[in-house]
C-alpha cells in the first residue's frame, strides 16, 4: 500500500489549462533526467515534436487558442503514447507529476471531437458488453472459488484483473496458489474491468459505474483488504478511483507488497533455491506511476540462489514495455517493437529470465520474445515464487 499524491481539485479542462500555463518547452522530457538516455518510446519512434510530451502540450495550446482545428490528422500524435510516465519523471516544471493526466485529458477531449484512437473503441464496446476489454465471456469466478475452496466472505479479495483472468491464466493461478499456500483468508468476487484501459484511452463516460460496481462487490465480500497482481489495476484502484471521486474503505496491495510484508514479519521463508540470473522490468504503472521500485527487488533478493541483475535503464529510468495507454490494441506492431528494445537491453545483462510484476508487461514482453526469438523465459515474480518451496510459520 503506497501513499500517492492526488490533486482532486483538478479534472479534465483544468489539466489542459495547467499544461497551457506551465510548460516552458525546455525538452527535458525527451530524455531520462540526468542520464540523457532516450526515455520516451513515442518520441523516439516518430521523431517529431508532436510525439513527445512537450509537443502534445503544444497541441493542447493550439486547440485552446483556436490555432489548431480538430482533425483526424491529430489522432496519432494524441493516441500513439503508452502513457509510460517517463516524461513525468524527467520534467522539472510544476506540472511534471500530471503529464500523464494531461495526456489523458487531451484524449478525453479528442474522443469527443474526433473519436477514439485506432481500434480503441473496441475497449469500450467489449467492456460494456461483457465487462472485460478482451471480449471474453465474463467469468463470475465461481468456478475458481469452488476449485480453490474459497469462502463467500473473507478479509482479503484477490482482484484478478482482466489480463490475468483472460490472457495470463498462469499468473492468476500462481497468485491463487501462493495465497492459499501462505494461508491468506481471501476470496474472489464477480469483478468487472477496473477501467484502466478506458481511462488511458480517454473513454471515460462509463468508468464510474464500473468502479462503483467493483467497490460494491468487494464490500459484499466483507473484505478490508484487496490484493492484485496487476500494476494497471493497482494504479487504477488507488489513484483513479479517487480521481473520479469513488470512495472505499479497504486497503489495496500489490502482490509484491504482501509477499514483502510476509517475509519481513518472518511469516514465510523461501526454502528452495532458484539458481538463475533474473533481470527485473519495472512496470510503468507500478514504478513511475506509483513509486514502487524497491519492494519487488527486495522480494527477488530473498529468493535463495537467485542472481538479480539490473538493466541499464532501471527504476524511474526504465524503458516501457510498450503495452499500455491503448498502444497494444491501437499500434500492435509498434507495441512489440518497444518490448524488443527492452529485451535487447535485458540481453546485455546476461539474464536468462526477464521478470516483471504486471500481466500486461508479461504479455507484451512474451510476444516480443516469441516474435523476435530472443530466447528468454518471461515470468512474473509470483510465477517464480509459485515454483519455490515456502515454509509457512504456523500461528501460535
Ligand atoms: S513538459 Fe516539462 S520537460 Fe517537457 S518541455 Fe514542458 S516543461 Fe520541459
Ligand atoms: S507518457 Fe511516455 S511515451 Fe507518452 S509522452 Fe510521456 S514519455 Fe513519451
Image (cartoon, grey):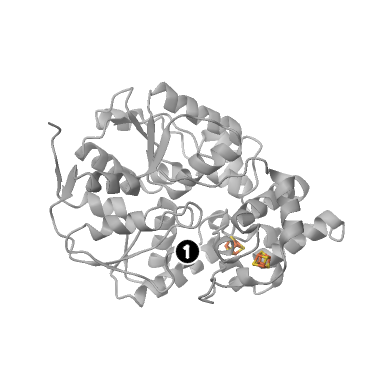
User: At which x and y percent is residue 345?
Assistant: 41, 74
Residue 329 position within the rendered picture, expressed as x and y whole percent measured from the top left: 55, 54
Location of the N terminus (image quadrant): top left
Residue 133 seen from this side: no
Q: Which residue is mark 1?
A: 316
In front of the other: 387 or 132: 387
Q: Quadrant of residue 155?
A: top left
Q: Within 10 angstroms of label 1, few (less than 14), some, or many (20 or more) residues?
A: many
| Circle 1 SS class | helix
Task: Please indicate whether residue 142 sits to the left or right of residue 391 in the image.
Answer: right
Q: Is residue 277 left or right of residue 97?
A: left
Residue 59 position (above or below residue 391): below
- List x then y, in percent, for residue 77: 69, 62
In the rendered image, residue 371, in percent from the top left (x then y), is placed at 42, 67
Q: How many marks?
A: 1
Q: Is residue 176 above or below residue 80?
A: above
Which residue is at a point 62% across and 44% down the rendered structure image? Answer: 7
- At 14% from the left edge and 59% from the top edge, which residue is drawn? 273
Query: Where is ligand 2, by quadrant?
Result: bottom right
Amino acid at each position: 500500500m503506497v501513499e500517492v499524491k492526488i490533486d482532486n481539485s483538478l479534472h479534465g479542462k483544468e489539466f489542459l489549462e495547467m499544461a497551457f500555463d506551465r510548460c516552458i518547452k525546455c525538452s527535458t522530457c525527451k530524455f531520462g533526467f540526468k542520464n540523457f538516455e532516450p526515455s520516451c518510446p513515442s518520441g523516439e519512434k516518430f521523431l517529431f515534436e508532436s510525439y513527445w510530451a512537450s509537443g502534445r502540450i503544444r497541441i493542447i495550446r493550439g486547440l485552446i487558442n483556436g490555432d489548431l482545428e480538430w482533425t483526424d490528422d491529430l489522432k496519432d500524435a494524441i493516441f500513439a503514447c503508452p502513457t509510460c510516465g517517463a516524461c513525468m519523471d524527467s520534467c522539472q516544471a510544476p506540472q511534471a507529476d500530471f503529464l500523464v493526466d494531461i495526456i489523458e485529458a487531451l484524449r478525453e477531449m479528442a474522443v469527443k471531437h474526433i473519436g477514439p484512437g485506432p481500434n480503441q473503441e473496441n475497449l469500450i464496446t467489449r467492456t460494456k458488453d461483457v465487462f472485460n476489454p478482451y471480449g471474453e465471456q465474463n467469468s463470475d469466478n465461481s468456478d475458481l472459488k469452488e476449485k480453490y475452496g474459497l469462502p463467500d466472505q473473507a478479509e482479503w479479495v484477490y482482484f484478478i484483473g482482466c489480463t490475468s483472468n483472460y490472457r495470463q491464466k498462469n499468473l492468476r493461478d500462481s497468485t491463487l496458489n501462493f495465497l492459499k499456500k501462505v494461508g491468506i483468508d481471501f476470496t474472489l468476487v464477480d469483478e468487472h474491468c477496473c477501467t484502466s484501459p478506458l481511462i488511458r484511452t480517454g473513454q471515460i463516460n462509463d468508468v464510474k459505474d464500473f468502479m462503483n460496481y467493483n467497490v460494491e462487490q468487494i464490500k459484499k465480500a466483507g473484505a478490508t483488504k484487496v490484493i492484485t497482481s496487476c500494476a494497471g489495476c493497482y494504479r487504477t484502484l488507488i489513484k483513479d478511483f479517487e480521481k473520479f471521486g469513488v470512495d472505499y474503505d479497504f486497503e489495496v496491495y500489490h502482490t509484491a507488497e504482501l509477499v514483502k510484508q510476509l517475509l519481513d514479519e518472518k511469516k514465510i521463508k523461501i526454502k528452495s533455491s532458484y539458481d538463475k540470473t533474473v533481470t527485473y522490468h519495472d512496470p510503468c504503472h507500478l514504478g513511475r506511476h506509483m513509486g514502487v521500485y524497491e519492494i519487488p527487488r527486495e522480494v527477488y533478493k530473498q529468493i535463495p540462489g537467485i542472481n538479480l541483475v539490473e538493466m541499464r535503464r532501471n527504476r524511474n529510468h526504465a524503458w516501457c514495455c510498450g503495452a499500455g495507454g491503448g498502444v497494444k490494441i491501437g499500434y500492435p506492431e509498434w507495441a512489440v517493437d518497444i518490448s524488443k528494445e527492452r529485451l535487447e537491453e535485458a540481453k546485455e545483462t546476461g539474464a536468462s529470465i526477464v521478470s516483471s510484476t504486471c500481466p500486461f508487461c508479461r504479455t507484451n514482453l512474451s510476444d516480443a520474445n516469441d516474435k523476435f526469438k530472443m530466447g528468454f523465459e518471461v515470468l512474473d515474480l509470483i510465477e517464480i515464487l509459485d515454483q519455490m518451496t515456502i515454509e509457512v510459520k504456523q500461528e501460535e
